[in-house]
Image (cartoon, helix red, strand yellow):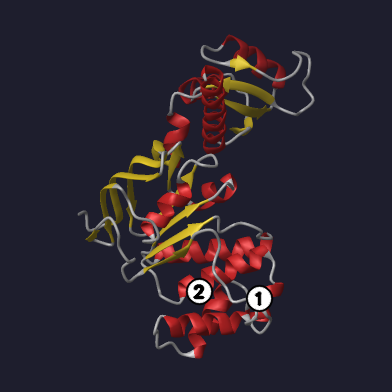
């Protein structure tokens, strides 16, 4: 076991009857890393999170959590916290009472100040004495995160923590997760919010039909053999368009050739071809004022997976 790994999973398989939820999944998550899980509905994300929290029994494979090998069925070791399918709360209790009761259930000898600190970290101090039955989805998610913080986790596992968050809630949650990672806590989270994953995660694992189709740094997605659409804004749109039209590996994909209204030039290319175009623009004395993908590499990969999965399902249905 690598001492720097909070999670080391090899060949994890989990079936529900004839349905294969996880099919030989490998996963490495380093201490101090925020690792994202991405995939279409039914890809196996929630099942994998359940396995990490000890809520699901694997059929085969090996798993090590915080340096400890665990069996097919295990109780999450100390230092592991999180939630799947939303946090469990007592609706008749206040936010503070929920956390106090949870600390008591864990036989955690915490002072009330620790509960208050957790509430402050997630931005719920002002509603600490409100009953949670009136909480919005985003407030419940933040309270679930506060509950996880009580155990001072070394591994935090979260399922869709951004659900229902307003900008203020998002800021609090991002701040908490970033701070935990800086302190050495490993964080694994699943989300359909690509912007959140790109803002928080250093690495992602993409699942499709229970299998890993990509796992690694976000930057490697752009380097994969996948063309993306990029928007370029330059000091001379007309000349930039002509250079792009002649550049190898570059395709123009935006409006008419005569359109130079400052909206920018949209091209489709792999990263090496785009780099070549940028060099040509600089050599020709054309200033590059803006360059970025119209759709992020992570979102493009997700959309490609979703489309491929839909195509596979249609083919299976047609073949019956």
Does label 1 or label 2 sit earlier along the sequence?
Answer: 1
Is residue 278 toward the left or the right of residue 272 in the image? right
**Residue 174, horizontal then vertical, whole percent:** 55, 61
Q: Taking 300 as reference, is 218 above or below it?
A: below
Q: Taking 35 as reference, is 135 above or below it?
A: below
Q: Taking 257 as reference, is 21 above or below it?
A: below
Is residue 182 toward the left or the right of residue 236 in the image? left
* Residue in front for this viewpoint, 308 or 290: 308
**Residue 193, horizontal then vertical, whole percent:** 59, 48
Label 2 residue SS: helix
**Residue 238, horizontal then vertical, whole percent:** 71, 17
Number of residue marks: 2
Q: Which residue is mark 2?
A: 147
Residue pushed farthest top?
246
Q: Which residue is rendered at x = 43% and y = 54% of the image?
A: 49
Dot 1, crowdedness within 10 Å: few (<14), some or many (≥20)?
A: many
Q: Which residue is rendered at x = 56% and y = 80% of the image?
A: 98
Residue mark closest to the camera, 1 vs 2: 1
Label 1 residue SS: helix
Q: Which residue is mark 1?
A: 132
Q: Taking 184 as reference, is 284 above or below it?
A: above
Q: Which residue is rendered at x = 58% and y = 83% of the image?
A: 96
* Residue in front for this viewpoint, 116 or 83: 83
* Residue in front for this viewpoint, 56 or 137: 56
The quadrant of the rendering that contains the N terminus is bottom left
Indicate the quadrant where residue 306 lies: top right
């Amino acid at each position: 076991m690598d001492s720097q790994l909070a999670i080391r999973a090899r060949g994890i398989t989990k079936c529900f009857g004839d349905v294969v939820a996880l099919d030989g999944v490998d996963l490495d998550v380093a201490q101090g890393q925020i690792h994202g899980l991405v995939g279409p509905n039914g890809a196996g994300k929630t099942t994998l999170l359940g396995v990490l929290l000890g809520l699901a029994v694997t059929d085969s494979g090996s798993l090590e959590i915080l340096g400890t090998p665990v069996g097919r069925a295990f109780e999450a070791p100390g230092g592991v916290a999180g939630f799947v399918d939303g946090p469990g709360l007592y609706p008749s209790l206040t936010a503070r009472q929920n956390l106090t009761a949870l600390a008591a259930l864990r036989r955690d000898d915490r002072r009330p100040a620790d509960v208050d600190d957790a509430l402050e970290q997630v931005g719920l101090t002002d509603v600490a004495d409100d009953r949670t039955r009136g909480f919005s989805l985003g407030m419940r998610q933040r309270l679930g995160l506060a509950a996880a913080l009580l155990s001072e986790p070394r591994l935090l596992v979260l399922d869709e923590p951004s659900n229902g968050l307003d900008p203020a809630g998002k800021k609090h949650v991002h701040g908490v997760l970033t701070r935990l990672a800086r302190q050495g806590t490993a964080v694994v989270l699943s989300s359909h919010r690509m912007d959140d994953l790109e803002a928080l995660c250093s690495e992602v694992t993409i699942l499709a039909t229970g299998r890993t189709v990509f796992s690694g740094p976000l930057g490697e997605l752009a380097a994969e053999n996948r063309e993306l659409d990029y928007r370029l804004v330059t000091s001379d749109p007309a000349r930039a368009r002509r250079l792009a039209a002649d550049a190898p590996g570059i395709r123009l994909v935006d409006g008419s050739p005569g359109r130079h209204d400052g909206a920018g030039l949209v091209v489709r290319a792999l990263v090496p071809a785009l780099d070549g175009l940028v060099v040509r623009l600089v050599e020709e004395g054309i200033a590059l004022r803006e360059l970025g993908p119209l759709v992020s590499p992570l979102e493009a990969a997700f959309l490609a997976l979703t489309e491929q999965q839909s195509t596979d399902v249609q083919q299976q249905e047609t073949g019956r």
